[in-house]
Amino acid sequence: MFSRLIIATGNKGKYKEFVDIIRETGGNDFAEQIIFAPEISHLIVEETGKTYAENAMLKARAWAERSGLPCLADDSGLEVDALDGAPGLFSARIIHGNDTDKASWLLTQLDGISNRKARFSAALCLCVPDDFTLISEGYCYGNIAQSPRGANGFGYDPVFVPEGFNQTFAELPPDVKNKISHRTNAFKKILTVLMKGG
């Protein structure tokens, strides 16, 4: 479908996950070459949107304009019921520090709280220069673990247990996570639209 597709992220873990999702969900027909954006250019896009979809669109359009190539971008976050949806839109920057620091911050916020329900939310934007822009959203529901577990994935994966499983995202094999993740659910919607031709 595309000879080249840019994944508009600076997060290598997210890029790898997208490659796996596209290959496992869309097959090789979706994109022959999937490019990690920083490998072709340096571009910082300020995430000034008020929703995941707005931020995803900002990134996809900026990279499409810079490169002249189709671009896929996402914005995503972890929404915790007991924290009124926080960290949400600010999941990646709720505090200064690495992924471990952010997971620790979250567990501290939930100390002594029995309601551990949460969901990962993702908005994807596919921007094809001078042609079209598609946006979709996907979710994965689950609970926050009592402590970090597992070495796979990135972000809050070690503390998120998806519904129907006893393991965290970081404990599950990547191919299992990719079958149920919020990004996969959002990507499937984009793929469905493209396959229908509109």
Image (spheres, rainbow, N blue to C red):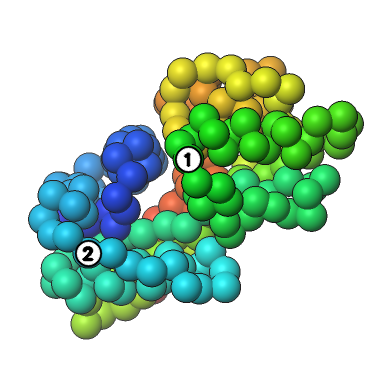
Q: Is residue 179 visible?
A: no
User: Which residue is drawn at the image coordinates 73% and 46% (left, top)?
Assistant: 80
Q: Quadrant of residue 111?
A: top right
Mark 1 falls on what kind of element?
loop
Identify residue type, mark 2: Leu
Q: Taking 48 as reference, is 118 above or below it? A: above
Q: Nearer the viewer, residue 22 or 197?
A: 22
The vertical placement of 162 against 41, above or below, is: above
Mark seen at residue 97:
1
From the viewer's perspective, is the residue at label 2 or at label 1 nearer?
A: 1
Q: Residues within 10 Å of mark 1 (few under 14, many from 20)?
A: few
**Residue underneath mark 2:** 43
Q: Secondary structure at mark 2?
A: loop
State the quadrant of the C terminus.
bottom left
Residue 92 x, y percent position in the rendering: 50, 49
The image shows residue 23 at horizontal and vertical percentages of 30, 38
- Type of amino acid under label 1: Gly
* Horizontal relation, residue 110 to residue 191: left or right: right
In the picture shown, does residue 30 fall above or below 127? above
Quadrant location of the N terminus in the rendered image = bottom left
Closest to the observer: 61 or 112? 112
Q: Position of residue 19 (x, y in %)?
A: 29, 40
